Amino acid sequence: MALFSVFFMETLALPIPYWMPASWRSSNAWPLFLYEDVVVPFSCLCNIQIDLFLCYLMFNFTLCLRMIGMRMERLGEQNDEEITTELENIIKTHQRVECMAKSCQKIITWPVLTQIIFSSLIICCSIYSIQRISFSENPSNFLGFIQYVTAMALEIYIPCYYANEITVESENLSNHLYNCDWTGMSLYNRRQIFLYMEHLKHPIALYAGGYFQIGLPVFSKTMNNAYSLLALLANVNEEE
């Protein structure tokens, strides 16, 4: 909408202003407008793809864990030899998922930590600015800040949600394995299942910078910390 707002302005201006020579309105106005019309959406799409790539990796691991859980529940439908082979394949698949999760953590750990820190600061400062803006006097800036705060909150929430899904699905593997008809299996397979369930007591979890686990609790704490910082700024402003 910002790109097309130029057509409704009385004075010619670029949708996203930046420094230009004083004579740009007379000779280069429309080429500059076309340049922004192409570059700005492309830059936005690139940023979205970079953010969603990390979420795609985590969502892929979630689907792998769900597939493993479905295979676990069908173990009781086979004979002992097939159960032994399938259980070994499940364990190997789970080990590969754990190795991929460790590799994924190396990719997402610092970007997610940086995103959480700076987004929380931006949310705090944006809400502080909203409190000082009158909607009736300047509705465009007010709505712009609201949109920006929502975008920053989503940039924290989405990776936290998908990382939390990995942990939840990993914790559910014990229930899936218990729900198979293990009572009718051979002693060897039951021992294998027991040992595997001991391993499943340690679910997969991703950490941001090695400091805290990425998940929905982190999103809640981040929003609470942003609100606490906002209250501190408001109190300092009232004292001044």
Image (cartoon, helix red, strand yellow):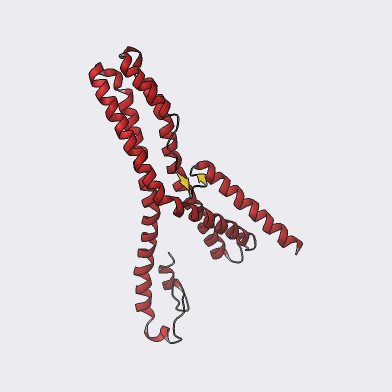
Residue 20 in the image: state x and y as whole percent: 44, 81
Residue at 34%, 22% in the rendered image: 192
Q: Is residue 176 visible?
A: no
Residue visible at 42% across and 50% down in the picture: 108
Residue 110 position, x and y percent, is 46, 53
Left or right: 211 as drawn, with respect to 233? left
Q: Residue at x 23, y 21 (%)?
A: 82
In this rendering, is residue 213 above or below 239? above
Q: Residue 98: x, y in percent?
A: 36, 38
Q: In the rendering, at what x and y percent does residue 152 appear? A: 50, 55
Position of 222 with respect to 85 (left or right) is right
Residue at the image point whose x is 35% and y is 34% from the top: 65
The image quadrant that residue 8 belongs to is bottom left
**Front position in the image: 121 or 136:** 121
Q: Is residue 142 above or below residue 73?
A: below
* Quadrant housing the C terminus: bottom right
In front of the other: 176 or 38: 176
Viewer-side residue, 19 vs 105: 105
